[in-house]
Image (cartoon, rainbow, N blue to C red):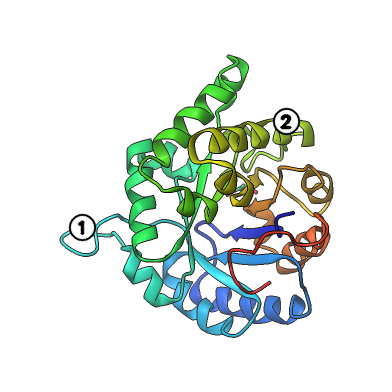
Amino acid sequence: MRTPFIAGNWKMFKTVHEAVVYAKEFRSLVKDVTGVEIVVAPPFLAVHAVAEALRNSNVAVAAQDLYWEREGAFTGAVSAPMIKEAGAEFVIIGHSERRRLFGETDQAVNRKLLAALAANVGPIVCVGETLEEREAGQTLAVLDRQVRAGLDGLTAETVADLVVAYEPVWAIGTGKVATAAQAQEAHAHIRGRLRQWFGAHAADHCHIVYGGSVKPDNIAELIQEPDVDGALVGGASLDVKGFWNIVMKSQHAQGPQGTPGKTGKS
Ligand code: PEP
């Protein structure tokens, strides 16, 4: 029903030169792909060069973070209008590495989300529980807290346009992927909350993608689940052929397109 959305998060990998070499090869590999929305998220420094290398292609660019102020004395920070002008159509917000290593709170996630929307940059908002939280039976409560606080103040219309990434922290970069059933349970729960808090249109149109050790050999099973609308891929997106493979295996996974995509390029 929702066009599969596949985004590659390169984290702190690739120089500008390496990123452009990848982008040029990737654009030619996926040039005939339809029915999948494709996004790559290079480090800040490479956003502009990658966006240029992908101009007029079917691949959009995301930044990996932003700061909520427009400009000012915030050394090291980058704002939503800055990434937008550099060519980012999307931005990853609240990745667990930012929450864990940089102390990002749900409130910071919310401010960043509002700043992205104000600049017309599409947020990819990450939520997910730690292993400890899962083992304590707190997974759904943690998701409730992160979704409620993160999306505070959003309208139903903006929620419909969002991408939410369910990324169990224990599955990120560990090689331990959630089972399709675990992913579906979490995604269905999030969609249920979106329906309850923002209405049916928002819940049905919002993309909920899975992240956590997605690879060419497990994407097909995950994306068959009715509430898994794509993937946020870390490590496996660094290899151009591997990421291409993931895109190919997501193609038409959810049948005829029922709702418009987010990139406007699929
Ligand atoms: C990520 O960085 O969002 C991620 C899911 O990483 P990996 O695919 O490497 O687990």
Taking 247 as reference, is 136 left or right? left
At x 65%, y 43%, the residue is 212
1 or 2: tag closer to the N-terminus? 1
Q: Amino acid at mark 2?
A: Gln
Above or below 86: residue 189: above
Say if disc 2 is inside 8 Å of ligand 1: no
Q: Quadrant of the C terminus?
A: bottom right
Say if disc 1 is inside 8 Å of ligand 1: no
Neighbours of disc 1 within 10 Å: few (<14), some (14-19), many (20+): few
Taking 246 as reference, is 57 left or right? left
At x 59%, y 25%, the residue is 131
Q: SS for tag 2? A: helix
Q: Amino acid at mark 1?
A: Phe
Q: Which residue is outermost to the front? A: 200
Residue 74: mark in rendering: 1
User: Residue 66, image x and y in percent?
Assistant: 36, 57
User: Residue 227, image x and y in percent?
Assistant: 71, 42
Above or below 75: residue 173: above
Q: SS for tag 1? A: loop
At x 29%, y 59%, the residue is 77
Q: Quadrant of the N terminus?
A: bottom right
Q: Quadrant of residue 179?
A: top right
Residue picked out by circle 2 = 182
Q: Do we see residue 163 in this rendering?
A: yes
User: Residue 260, image x and y in percent?
Assistant: 64, 64
Q: Nearer the viewer, residue 172 or 124?
A: 124
Q: Nearer the viewer, residue 166 or 53?
A: 166
In three-dimensional space, the C-alpha distance between marks 1 and 2, rounded to whole angstroms, equals 40 Å
Residue 82: mark in rendering: none
Taking 132 as reference, is 101 left or right? left
Q: Do we see residue 105 in this rendering?
A: no
Q: Are marks 1 and 2 in contact (CB under 8 Å)?
A: no
